[in-house]
Structures are given as structure tokens and as C-alpha cells.
Image (tube, rainbow, N blue to C red):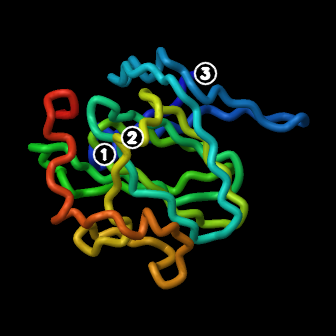
Amino acid sequence: MPAQIDRLAIPDVLLITPKVFGDARGAFAETYSRRELAEAGFNGVFVQDNHSRSPQKGTVRGLHFQLPPHAQDKLLRVTRGAILDVAVDLRPGSPTRGRHVAVELSADNWRQLLVPKGFAHGFQTLTDDCEVLYKVTDYYTPAAERGLLWSDPALGLDWPIGPDQAVINARDAAWPGLAELGEPFASASGAP
């Protein structure tokens, strides 16, 4: 039951669309295959699963990342509702540094996004009562957690719900913009 795996405008970010089989009982899909991801060039090992629930449409979570040596690859999917999922390239020397990809993930479309190390990641809920599940390749390390301002105009992100109506916590509203961020992945362990 191989999934369709597509490279996005930033080729290291993968969009995964599993094959969904339906009958009178409902639907079934294989949502993770280490073998298929390895065939697509990803060999990370996931060590932790996370689950977020956002009751209100317009909720923003991100843009987050962890510093090396605790940088994380992430594999995300939505089990209830819909989100706009965003990955911003922060890798030093990358030809796409500062650029982003954005994809709608929903419980209905079953799509998943693989966000590699070296990217800031976040999402905005497009519906009320959203649930997002994601796997990561390193454990959450509070001292390594950093972020990028989700609404920084320099990113050119077209969020469906703007800053005046978005639901965001104080920490995420205070992250630095791209120009102030520096090179968080400049160490050898975080370079592409």
C-alpha cells in the first residue's frame, strides 16, 4: 500500500498522501512506513509522538524549532479538522533559506508533512476543534527550544487569519523575526 510522496518547492520537505481504503465500515490507511520514507531518502528514527488540540479556528502554534544537537525532524498529520502547515528553511547556506512551504492538512485529505531538521515549523487551525499528531526524531528539550515570529512580513506568509484575529500565546508572539534570528543551525550537527 505505498503512499504517494511528493517533494515540495523546497525539495527536502515531503508531502505524503497515504492510500486510503474505504468500505461500509469506514476507512483504513497505513499512516507510517519507515521503509517508504527511507526509499524517499529519509532515514530518521522517531522517538516521541506529540498530540495537540486547538479548540478555536485561527489558533497559531509556532514557528518552532530546537537547536542542535536536539534538532528535530517532524512528521505531522491531522486527525480532526484542518490546518495550514508551514515550514520555513533556516539552514545556513541553503539556496532556499528564509523561504517557506505551506500545505493544507486535514482529517479529510489524510495528507502528512515531513519537516526536516533546519526548519522552523508551525501551523494555523482552519477549523474549530483541531487535533494534530506528530512524530519527532529527538526528545523535547526546553533549553533547546527556539522560535521565529510567525507574522514576520519578511517571510511572505499568507496566513488565512491575520494577527489581529489569530489566537496565539505570548511566547509565540514574542519570537524574533528572520532578520534578528541569526543562524540557529550554524553548528556542524545542524547544517544541511
Q: Are marks 3 and 2 in contact (CB under 8 Å)?
A: no
Q: Secondary structure at mark 2?
A: strand
> x, y percentage for residue 1?
60, 21
- Please state which of residues 142 and 50 is positioned toward the viewer in this rendering: 142
Residue 152's quadrant in the figure?
bottom left
Q: Nearer the viewer, mark 3 or mark 2?
A: 2
Q: Nearer the viewer, mark 3 or mark 1?
A: 1
Residue that sits furthest to the left in the current view: 93
Q: Is residue 84 above or below residue 189?
A: below
Residue that sits furthest to the top in the current view: 35
User: What is the spatial separation of the Cα atoms under label 3 and label 2, in whole angstroms?
Assistant: 23 Å
Q: Secondary structure at mark 3?
A: loop
- Residue at the disc numbered 1: 119
Q: Are marks 1 and 2 in contact (CB under 8 Å)?
A: yes
Q: Earlier in the sequence, mark 3 or mark 1?
A: 3
- Residue at the disc numbered 3: 1
Judge the density around disc 3: few (<14), some (14-19), many (≥20) Cα neighbours within 10 Å: few
Judge the density around disc 2: few (<14), some (14-19), many (≥20) Cα neighbours within 10 Å: many
- Please state which of residues 164 and 79 is positioned toward the viewer in this rendering: 164
Judge the density around disc 1: few (<14), some (14-19), many (≥20) Cα neighbours within 10 Å: many
Q: Residue 115 shows which numbered tag?
A: 2
What residue appears at the point 27 percent right and 34 percent down from the top-left corner?
Answer: 68
